[in-house]
Amino acid sequence: MTFTNMVLIGVALFAIVGAIGAFTVAFRRSRADAPAPDPTAGVSEETRRSDRSMEGVRVEPLPEPEPVSEPQPAEVEVEVEAEPSQELAPAGGSVQVIERQRVIEVTPEESGVTRRQFFNRALSGTFFAFLGLVGINSLAFMWPKLSGGFGTDVDAGTVADIQNQTVAADGSIVPVFVPEARAYVVPSPVVPESMEGDGVEAAGLMALFQRCVHLGCRVPWCATSQGFECPCHGSKYSSIGEYFAGPAPRNLDRFVVEVQSDRFIIKTGTVIQTPRSQLLSVSYPRGPSCIGG
């Protein structure tokens, strides 16, 4: 788990806890502000008229509580007046001091942001920031790669260089692995009939998908047998990916390829699947197997 994922999870938990807290406060307030239920609700009018239990009883209505408004910050001005203001107190007398307070109400603009407003705004900002991060990461994950990488057209190099690398001095085959395309480039002396017209061969070269068609293991090259042999479950393929043995249901998958300005291009966005070959187009195996059997 990366640090970015941990941060996203932490922010998500914080936002969820804050949302639950805000919902709880709002629910309690709505319950407190709800009017008291009427005990006679659902009683028919005939039953009300026949009820004699309250005859002769005078019921004084309860005084309605005065609406309580949120206290506003107030400025307190203290005026101190001394009486008499101009006359001196007689000798041996006392001075009486009268204190008066005057409350001045201020507007919400003058009082500023209350603590409740601050927490509500902070919670909303955190929640929307979390949504923004999730949206950005989702777009980055689903946005297609416009150039380079698996799923696009991959330039494997010049045709001449690849042809020289795929055939050793003794005539044996040495596949060229292209990591960006996840493919082996191999020489193709012949094109099987089941693959003709699919565009899987160009300049005498093919690009085979590295994945075994059985359960997806990477299939390595076996130099002694001159073929591809899967170490997971024993599937075997010839040098051009034709099925030979094992539980694999078909030949190795391959990509559409073409030559552009003497560059060998592998179109990894197009995968070609072909059924098992009845007869191999190339000789296999040419030596001992790397996985036995």
Image (tube, rainbow, N blue to C red):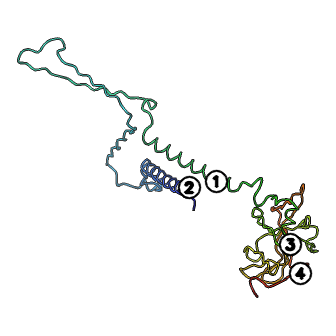
Crowdedness near tag 2: few (<14), some (14–19) or many (≥20) residues, C-alpha within 10 Å: some
Quarter of the picture containing the C terminus is bottom right
Marks 3/4 in contact by CB < 8 Å: the verdict is no
Q: Which residue is mark 4?
A: 283
Task: State the residue in front, 124 or 259.
Answer: 259
Q: Which mark is residue 137?
A: 1
How far apart are the alpha carbons under marks 1 and 3?
50 Å
| Residue type, mark 2 in image | Leu
Q: Which of the two labelled residues, at mark 2 and mark 3, occupies the earlier sequence position?
A: 2
Q: Position of 199 compared to 218: left or right?
A: right
Marks 2/1 in contact by CB < 8 Å: the verdict is yes
Q: Which residue is mark 2?
A: 8
- Classify mark 4: helix, strand or loop: loop
How far apart are the alpha carbons under marks 3 and 4?
19 Å
Q: Which of the two labelled residues, at mark 1 and mark 4, occupies the earlier sequence position?
A: 1
Residue 4, quarter of the rendered image: bottom right
How far apart are the alpha carbons under marks 2 and 1?
10 Å
Q: Residue 106: percent from the left, percent from the top?
A: 40, 29
Q: Residue 39: percent from the left, percent from the top?
A: 41, 54
| Residue type, mark 3 in image | Ala
Q: Which residue is mark 3?
A: 169
